[in-house]
Amino acid sequence: MSEDIAFRLLADGDWDAVVELEHDAYAADGLSEGRVALQSRARPSPGTCYVLEHRGRVRGYVLSLPYPLYRCPDLTRAEERSHEEGSHEERSHEEGGHHSRNLHLHDLVIAEELRGRDVALRFVRHVRAQAQRQGFERISVVAVRRTDVLLAMLGYRTHREVPVPACYGPRAVYMSMAI
């Protein structure tokens, strides 16, 4: 199985598969964002967005982008600006005044037939290794649909004090980890 799986950077020709996977994963819960919003999340940082190929087909993806720590994208609208460096105010709020380069793992989807086979763990480890190589210091994520349990086992810390927009659903929680 492992030789059938490869991780690579997201390419322009992958968007149809990404949009289909995202819709299948989130539409029933009202969390599907659609192509325009998804592409706006990838645009600021194409070097941190990946696909999972299984037997030559895109069967998963990760959209991640530099984003201020303790903040997250609003699912109801597309990204309007890059958060690469953050404003002075954002930097002074983070980590007691120390700016940390944060990569926000906005979305990770794996096709249903590949779930539960350690594929997600391998994909998350790949993203973490790439983030570290690129100089990021933290990874943040909003856990939805009770994925906080899995993320906690991977080393993510829950930040219940961080408000999460209602568009993420009633059980969404902000989490982060040092790289």
Image: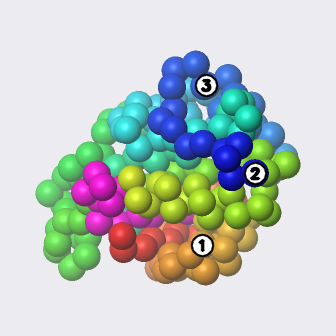
- Which residue is label 2 attached to? 1
Range of residues picked out in magenta: 131-142
- Which residue is label 3 attached to? 15
* Residue 129 image offset from top left, x and y in percent: 41, 59
- Three-letter code for the amino acid on which mark 3 is drawn: Trp
- Which residue is label 1 attached to? 151
Tell which tag, 2 or 1, sits nearer the viewer. 2
Real-space CA distance between mark 1 and mark 3, rounded to the nearest whole angstrom = 26 Å
Mark 1, secondary structure of its residue: helix
Q: Counting residues from the N terminus, which is met first, the one under dot 2 or under dot 3? A: 2
User: In the rendered view, would you say 53 is above or below 143?
Assistant: above
* Residue 115 image offset from top left, x and y in percent: 78, 57
Is residue 116 or residue 49 the one in the foreground? Answer: 116
Q: Counting residues from the N terminus, which is met first, the one under dot 2 or under dot 1? A: 2
- Three-letter code for the amino acid on which mark 1 is drawn: Leu
Mark 2, secondary structure of its residue: loop
